[in-house]
Amino acid sequence: MSRKLFELEGLVALVTGAGQGMGLGVARALATQGARVVINDYYPERAEGAAAQLREEGFEVCAAPGDITDAEVRESIVATAEREYGPVNILVNNAGVPPGMPNSLSHFENLADEDFERQLDLNLRAILGLTRLVMDGMVEQGFGRIIIISSESWRQGLQFGLTNYAAAKSAALGFMRHLAHEVGRKGITANAVSLGTMNNFGDYAEYAKATAVGRTGTPEDVGAAVAYLASREASWMSGQVLPLNGGSITS
């Protein structure tokens, strides 16, 4: 997103898994709208590199690298955000592929115990843990946005070995829906963006044929959707899953 559509001035956003790809697209979109953005990534060099890149583009950004599946690290990341900019107003739970599992594909019957736990730790427990850490500040300010980046794998069964990943994503969406009812009258919304096939690092032409618009998604597409959900203009949007799949699934 290259121009300002929403007013995020004065707001602080924490984006997990934002060192590259979709997460970086989200961070850039929020910064473009005026938010001060804290970039988390498991790999410090990616977090620092992305933050430096956005600062060169004129945005107010800092890095807070670390493994968000670790409770103490989560506390440190939120503390960094608060020290640099103040309480987090916008939490974007984007990180979703555990380190060492570049494509997340592993059939359930063959899934190693440690990989089973890693998916749940990253795609469910870390989301709950981070939300708990930022919630008090959101309640105190009377404004907050909890946004989960999910996958259309929760909606449609596939043969690609996404069973454990989809189970964790589905649980996170259930959490989001109930949280929306708990905190909605306190000025806080909770929503999710559910992604179809994304073009993060290359052109997946074969998958583009299944979409109504004839292409795969981009980090910019995700950033635009998140910028809306994060905005003050989206105050009447809560407890929802926004499909972002190019029309490949229209039910």
Image (cartoon, rainbow, N blue to C red):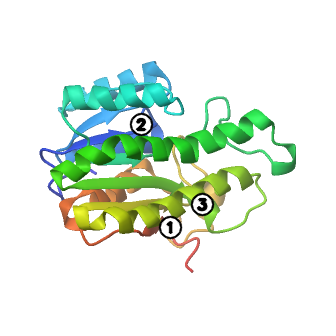
- Along the line of sight, the residue nearer the viewer: 75 or 20: 75
Mark 3 and mark 2 lie on one chain; the one further toward the N terminus is 2
Q: Is residue 96 visible?
A: no
Residue that badge 1 annotates:
246
Q: How many marks?
A: 3
Residue 209, above or below 62 = below
- In space, the residues marked 3 and 1 are separated at their CA atoms by 21 Å
Residue pointed to by mark 2: 18
Q: Nearer the viewer, mark 3 or mark 2?
A: 3
The numbered mark at residue 218 is none
Residue sitting at 42 percent across and 69 percent down?
240
Which quarter of the picture shows residue 182? bottom left
Task: Give residue 145's quadrant in the image.
Answer: bottom left
Q: Position of residue 179 (x, y in %)?
A: 41, 61
Task: Residue 173: give x, y in percent of width and height.
Answer: 52, 61
Circle 2: element type: loop
Residue that numbered label 3 is attached to: 170
Mark 3 or 1: in front is 3
Residue at the (33%, 32%) spot, across then down: 78
Q: Is residue 237 shown to the viewer in this render?
A: yes
Under tag 3, what secondary structure? helix
Q: Residue at x 39, y 46 (%)?
A: 131
Badge 3 vs badge 2, beta-carbon distance below 8 Å: no
CA distance for labels 2 and 1:
23 Å
Which three-letter amino acid code belongs to the residue tagged 3? Answer: Ser
Residue at the bottom extreme of this rendering: 251
The residue type indicated by label 2 comes to Ala
